[in-house]
DNA sequence: CAACTCTAGAAGGTGTTGCTTATATAAGTC
DNA sequence: GACTTATATAAGCAACACCTTCTAGAGTTG
């Protein structure tokens, strides 16, 4: 499943937003999502499973809690895909900025 | 419908790729997609409709042909969303590059 | 104008997705 | 050890996405 397919759901996008500043327990995520989207705990758990199974997050148990965190790799693929369209909104990058952007991409690919 | 939802389909992503270097007729897109994905012309036409209806492309009639082109706005939204995760894979941008990136975002928001 | 090309739409079938309720499992607490 | 908390899984269902075949309409060509 491509990262785009996983991101094609507003709940899953929101969950990732909640994880952007660091790991959160399933419960903490759940509290916010159930409130914002009016869905149940198992529904959230299923979305977390999709994120997990497709490598968008990592999980780490701590006692009875599960700590979820963003795994950036698949998001980087999305970023790479978008990259080819970037010239539409940044047509006249000056030489220096272009060079920096190019260098970033190169470094990314090498890793 | 959020751009991410539209992009959550491999056929539609491929169609946009085909349009990245300039406008193409429905027929030209169709020829490639039907061959690559083994789906029919109406199926491609329906995907084009989704792209069109959600502002991912523009269309321009020319005789009996329809010329499709990328409309970058919604892709920019995707880029903006991804932006918050970018620090995961570019953690130590030096001051200059950071400044350029920041400036780009600012300019984008003003437009 | 008849035949053909290009494209879109309508109607219908099917698999998938995302939800629900109910339940299981594992770990803390009294 | 019983009870509670935290999380995941199972089963079932409704809605939707995407496909197909068939057809319509607009424009071109002989």
Image: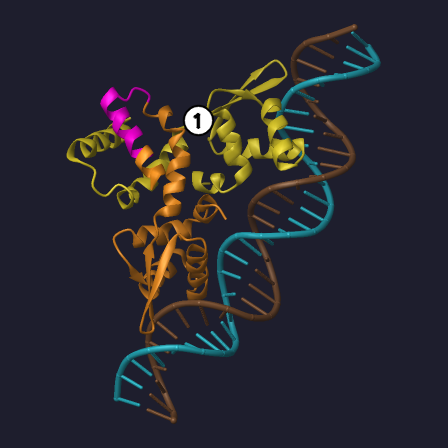
Chain colours: A yellow, B orange, C brown, D cyan
In this rendering, the answer to whether C8 lies above or below B86 is: below
Q: Is residue B96 magenta?
A: yes
Residue at 60%, 31% in the rendered image: A33
Residue at 49%, 30% in the rendered image: A16
In this rendering, the answer to whether A107 lies above or below B20 is: above
Taking depth in this image into account, of A77 and A9 the one nearest to the observer is A9
**What chain letter is assigned to the residue under label 1?**
A
Q: Is residue A52 visible?
A: no
Q: Is residue A4 magenta?
A: no
Majority SS type along the magenta span: helix
In this rendering, the answer to whether B64 lies above or below A27 is: below
Magenta range: B91-105
Q: Position of residue B26 (x, y in %)?
A: 35, 64
Q: Position of residue B79 (x, y in %)?
A: 37, 38
- Residue that badge 1 annotates: A71
User: Residue placed farthest to the left in the image?
Assistant: A95
């Amino acid at each position: 499943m491509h990262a785009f397919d996983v991101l094609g759901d507003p709940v899953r996008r929101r969950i990732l937003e909640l994880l952007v500043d660091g790991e959160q327990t399933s419960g903490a995520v759940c509290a916010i999502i159930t409130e914002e989207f009016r869905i149940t705990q198992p529904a959230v758990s299923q979305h977390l499973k999709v994120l997990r199974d497709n490598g968008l997050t990592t999980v780490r148990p701590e006692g009875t809690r599960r700590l979820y965190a963003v795994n950036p790799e698949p998001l980087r693929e999305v970023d790479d895909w978008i990259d080819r369209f970037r010239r539409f909104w940044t047509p006249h990058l000056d030489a220096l900025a272009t060079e920096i952007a190019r260098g970033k991409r190169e470094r990314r690919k090498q890793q």
